[in-house]
Image: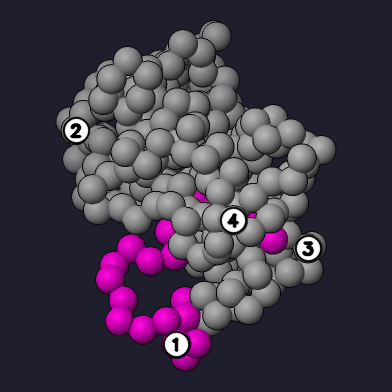
Amino acid sequence: MARTVGDVVAALERRYPPELASEWDAVGLVVGDPHASTTSVLFAVDPVMDVVDEAMDTGADMIVTHHPLFLRGVHSVAPITPKGRVVHTLIGHGIALYCAHTNADHARPGVSDALAAACGLADTVAIDPWGEQVGTGRVGQLQQPVTLAELAQRLVSAVPATEHGIRVAGDLEQSVETVAVCGGAGDSLLEVIGDRADVYITGDLRHHRAQDHLLATGKALIDVPHWAAEWLWLPDAASALASDLGADTVSTSVSKIDTSPWTAHLGRTT
């Protein structure tokens, strides 16, 4: 049975309903005819030209990204800007683009569930719940306590390697058991978490907010690369789509291109 772009969109939105997206977000079909046929879907974090080139090289006729192409209103998509070139290239090669951002963050299972699984958490609940099954971030228990260093090393092994690396704040030998996670940028949840978790794992932690949390709670922090933490969701989403539509009708693949903006890590350590 031939599948269409619209079939892929419908399957994605059953798992990641658009109504779960934050008000400021821009999710959904960006480029592509819902009636066009599709046989190969590439999953990636960012809708950048490197990913579009990969889709063309591998024969994918649809891309699903976590991050939106446009978060603010635009007045032109002329190919004189990076995003304009993406739009023109997609249309010119008949490649559709769909974005599942905060709806995939808040759904269950979603982005933070993939990060929680990489940590080995069980029986997780949302840090900031919206209902019985959805919400922002996850908090749960490890099967047995480990040191902060062991948990950090577990993440080093689980996430794709980047120049950013894994940063840790806290005593590496301290025991941790209750763990909170949030894929992407999650320091807005620091006040919500408080001292509920022995360690909070997220990306893009800022100096003052991290310092205030450490001083107020004494609880540890692990800063993971934004791109790498969210990449963990891609294989899950790709597998789910293949299962929902039938792998014999739509093939799925996951981009391994590091689209993080950081390309080198220099300097001394103490």
Residue at image coords 33%, 36%:
20
Q: Earlier in the sequence, mark 2 or mark 3?
A: 3
Is 58 rendered above or below residue 225?
Answer: below
Residues at circles 1 and 4 in contact by the CB criterion of under 8 Å: no
Q: Quadrant of the N terminus?
A: top right
Q: Label 1 to label 3, Cα distance in Å? A: 25 Å
Q: Which residue is mark 2?
A: 191
Q: Earlier in the sequence, mark 2 or mark 4?
A: 4
Query: Pointer 2 and pointer 3: residues touching (CB < 8 Å)?
Result: no
Q: Helix, strand, or loop for circle 1?
A: loop
Residue type, mark 2 in image? Glu
Reading the image, the residue beneath label 3 is 59
CA–CA distance between discs 4 and 3? 19 Å
Label drawn at residue 52? none
Q: Which kind of residue does numbered mark 3 sit on? A: Gly
Residue interval drawn in magenta: 61-84
Q: Is residue 41 left or right of residue 6?
A: right
Above or below residue 196? Residue 48 is below
